[in-house]
């Protein structure tokens, strides 16, 4: 038995096609945690049947069902039901490395009262869309920096966690106010920022590593990025007194000539070309820079243009 009761929490919505990956890994590592809570957020697929098929091989598995209310609510539901003093959150499409859970536990035994976000990279499928390679490339420099340092403490310039691979003492999670259930995106950044403002250190640790097994195309990725940008605007609008110090110094007025430049990349030709992998003839450096521009144009500057 671990020194501290450890609860692993996985939220899922219609995740039957991807849950097997993480469950098959965790069934062989059940000595690393005391309970595994999977919260089903109003799924309409065969998620429950899949989970029930794992109960004999993972006796510590606890299944909770609720009406669909979004990922902030579903994570909070898991936390409220948890018996553990330490909460470790994984998304249902994550593939944690063998040392991941124990690294989370070891960190909190050394630095109590902190938050920890683990290392993360995209798992590239056998027949991926080009955007999966782009996402790996976009994380490369940061992952190399984190790998070299092994563990980094967040400062004002890099506040954040990924709730897809994240741990926190339960009492601290409750004291901070848990995830903001009014948010449909950006709830992990919101939690991290509130914790930082209250003086709780946030660490990033490469060894608490997990792969993100997300088979996605460009249109879906662009849609998610739009949601993320919209969430940051909502945070500013709902909590101006809290976020003015963070967002205001980072806002830049887009000059008129640059608006025309980015507007050009909102035409459907660009999103269709990337979606259909039509730009592969370009050198990678140029191609990925073009992806950056198209994403910024369509998600940040002109998110409502069709």
Image: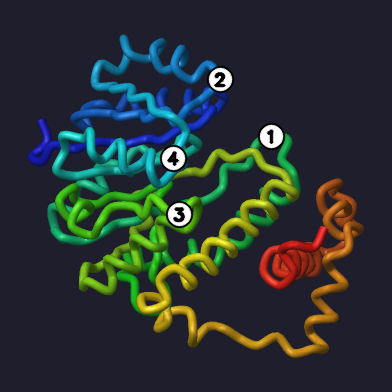
Whether pointer 1 and pointer 2 mark residues with C-beta atoms closer than 8 Å, the reply is: no
Q: Is residue 264 above or below residue 97?
A: below
Name the mark nearer the viewer: 3 or 4. 3
Left or right: residue 169 compared with residue 197: left
Of callouts 1 and 3, the N-terminal one: 1
Q: Secondary structure at mark 2?
A: loop
Residue pointed to by mark 1: 126
Label 3 with label 4: CB-CB less than 8 Å: no
Whichever of callouts 3 and 2 sits on the residue coming sooner in the sequence is: 2
User: Where's residue 181, x and y in %?
Assistant: 38, 50
Check disc 2 and report the residue beneath it.
Answer: 45
Gap between marks 1 and 2 measured at Cα: 25 Å
- The mark that comes first in sequence, 1 or 4, is 4
In whole angstroms, how far apart are the C-alphas of marks 3 and 2?
A: 25 Å
Q: Residues within 10 Å of mark 4 (few under 14, many from 20)?
A: many
Q: Would you name the residue on which mark 3 appears?
A: 183
Quarter of the rendering occupied by the C terminus: bottom right
In front: mark 3 or mark 2? 3
Sooner in the amino-acid sequence: mark 3 or mark 4: 4
Residue drawn at (53%, 16%), measured in percent from left and top?
46
Do labels 3 and 2 touch, CB within 8 Å? Answer: no
Mark 3 is surrounded, within 10 Å at the Cα level, by few (under 14), some (14 to 19) or many (20 or more) other residues, namely: some
Secondary element at tag 4: loop
Q: Residue at x 82, y 88 (%)?
A: 257
Q: Earlier in the sequence, mark 4 or mark 2?
A: 2
Picture layout, residue 175 above or below residue 75: below
Q: Is residue 83 visible?
A: yes
Which sits in the foreground, 283 or 95?
95
Residue 168 percent across, percent down from the top left: 24, 52
């Amino acid at each position: 038995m671990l020194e501290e009761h450890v609860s692993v929490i996985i939220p899922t919505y219609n995740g039957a096609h991807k849950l097997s990956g993480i469950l098959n890994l965790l069934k062989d590592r059940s000595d690393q945690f005391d309970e595994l809570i999977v919260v089903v957020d109003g799924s309409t697929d065969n998620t429950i049947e899949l989970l029930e098929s794992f109960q004999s091989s993972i006796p510590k598995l606890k299944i909770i069902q609720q009406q669909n209310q979004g990922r902030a609510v579903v994570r909070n539901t898991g936390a409220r039901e948890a018996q553990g003093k330490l909460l470790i959150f994984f998304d249902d499409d994550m593939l944690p490395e063998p040392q991941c859970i124990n690294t989370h536990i070891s960190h909190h035994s050394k630095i109590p009262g902190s938050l920890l976000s683990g290392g993360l990279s995209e798992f590239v499928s056998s027949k991926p869309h080009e955007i999966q390679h782009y996402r790996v490339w976009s994380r490369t420099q940061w992952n190399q920096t984190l790998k070299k340092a092994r563990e980094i403490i967040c400062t004002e310039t890099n506040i954040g966690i990924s709730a897809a691979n994240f741990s926190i003492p339960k009492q601290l999670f409750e004291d901070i106010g848990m995830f903001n259930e009014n948010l449909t995106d950006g709830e992990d950044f919101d939690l991290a920022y509130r914790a930082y403002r209250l003086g709780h250190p946030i660490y990033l640790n490469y060894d608490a590593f997990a792969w993100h097994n997300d088979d996605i195309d460009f249109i879906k990725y662009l849609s998610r990025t739009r949601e993320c940008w919209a969430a940051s605007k909502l945070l500013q609008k709902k909590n101006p007194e809290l976020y003015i110090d963070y967002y205001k110094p980072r806002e830049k007025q887009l000059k008129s000539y640059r608006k025309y430049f980015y507007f050009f990349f909102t035409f459907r030709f660009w999103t269709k070309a990337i979606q259909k992998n039509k730009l592969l003839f370009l050198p990678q450096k140029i191609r990925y820079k073009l992806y950056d521009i198209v994403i910024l144009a369509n998600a940040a500057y002109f998110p409502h243009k069709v």
